Image: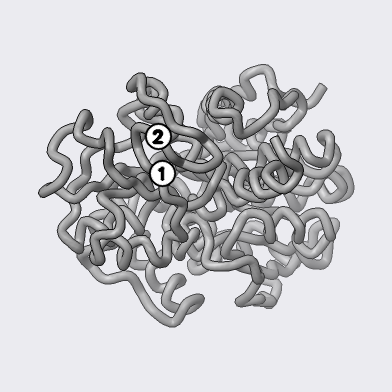
Amino acid sequence: MPATTRTTLRRGLAAAAALPLLVGALASCGYGSEAKNDEKKVAAEGKKLSADTVRLGYFPNLTHATALVGDQEGIFQKELGGTALQSTTFNAGPSEIEALNAGAIDIGFIGPSPSINGYTKSKGTNLRIVGGSASGGVKLVVNPEKIKTLDDVKGKRIATPQLGNTQDVAFLNWVAEKGWKVDSQSGKGDVSVLRTDNKITPDAYKSGSIDGAWVPEPTASKLVAEGGKVLLDESDLWPDKKFVITNIIVSQKFLTEHPDVVEAVLRGSVKTNAWINANPEQAKASANAKLKKLSGKALGDKVINSAWPSIQFIDDPLAATLQAQADHAVKAGLLKQPDLKGIYDLTALNKVLKAAGKPEVSDAGLGVK
C-alpha cells in the first residue's frame, strides 16, 4: 500500500467516528476539523477538586447527546463542584485526538475508530477509554424506487462518510459477508462505495448521484425526510442489538494526575444517561436546544423524532464490539492488526456504577495491563 494511501487511511480511521458519528456532518462525522464553541463555565458552589478546570470535548451530534444534555442541564458542572467545566466542540475525530494529544482538552466523547487509531498510533501512550456513552444510531437508507431488497444493493452507489471511518468499515464488512467484492481503497466493485461528507449526503441523494447511504443519525433521518427508506438498521447486525458508537476517553496524563475529576465527569455521564432514559422527550428537547446554541440551528421535529429512538444511551463501552470493529477494519485491509490491550481503564466507571447500585461493566480483556 503506498505511503500516501496509508496516510489517508489513518486519517479516515481517525475520523472514523468523528465523521461518522454524526457530525461527519453535524452528525457524526464531521463538518471540518476546527474546534469551536469554546465555553468556560463558572464553577458551581462546592469543593474544588484536584484541578481548577477540566476541558471537555465532544461533537454537536446526536450520538454525543450524553455530552450535549449533561452540559446543557448542568449535570457535569454539578458533579464537578468548584472545578470549572470548559467545553469545546469538534467536527472530526482527528482534530479531537490532536487536541487531546496537545493537552488542549482533557476528556472527550468520541467514536470507536478515532479511539482505536489514536491509541495505536501513539503505541498506547496517549489515551484511555474510561466509559461508554451511546450505542446504535446507524442505518442503511436507500432510494426505494431503485432498491427494494438487500440483494438490490449490489451494483448500486452507496455513500459512507469517509474512507476507513466507522460506518465505512461496517458497510465494507457487510458487503463482504454478502459475498460481494469491493476494493476498500477505491470503493469500486460489486457495489460502488462513494465516500461522501455527511453534510452533503442529503443533497447527493436528492440529485440522484447516490442510491443510498450507510450513515449515522441524524443524516439517516434527513435522507428519510427526503423520501429515503431505512433498509437496514446496523443494530440488527450486532449481539443484543448493541455496538459502541461513542466512547469517553481521557488523556493518560490527566487520568493519572486528576482521577477525582475523571470520576466526577463519569458520575455526571452516568447521571445524565439515567435522566435521558427516564425523560426521553425532555432530553431530546435539551439536546436539540444545545445543538441550536452550538450551530445556530435546531434539528426539525421530523428529523429528530425519527433519529432519537434509534440511539441507546448506555454507560457500558461495549468493549467486545470495539475489538470486533477493529477486526472488521483489518479484514477490509484498512488497518494492521492492532494491539488494544490497555486501551480501557474502567476502574472509575465501575466505582461510580457500584455506588449507583448498577452492575459493573467489562473491558473484554482489553483493560490496563
Q: Amino acid at mark 2?
A: Gly
- Image quadrant in which you'd find residue 337: top right
Label 1 with label 2: CB-CB less than 8 Å: yes
Q: Which mark is residue 189?
A: 2
**Residue 78 location in percent, x, y?**
61, 62
Q: Residue at x 22, y 31 (%)?
A: 150
Name the foreground residue: 48 vs 171: 171
Q: Which mark is residue 366?
A: none
Q: Residue at x 60, y 29 (%)?
A: 333
Residue at which label 1 appears? 193
> Would you call the spot at circle 1 few (<14 residues within 10 Å), some (14-19), or many (20 or more)?
many
| 220 left or right, relative to 329 | left
**Residue 145 location in percent, x, y?**
11, 49
Q: Secondary structure at mark 1?
A: strand
Q: Residue at x 81, y 54 (%)?
A: 101
Name the foreground residue: 306 vs 56: 306
Q: How many badges with numbers are in the image?
A: 2
| 54 left or right, relative to 39 | right
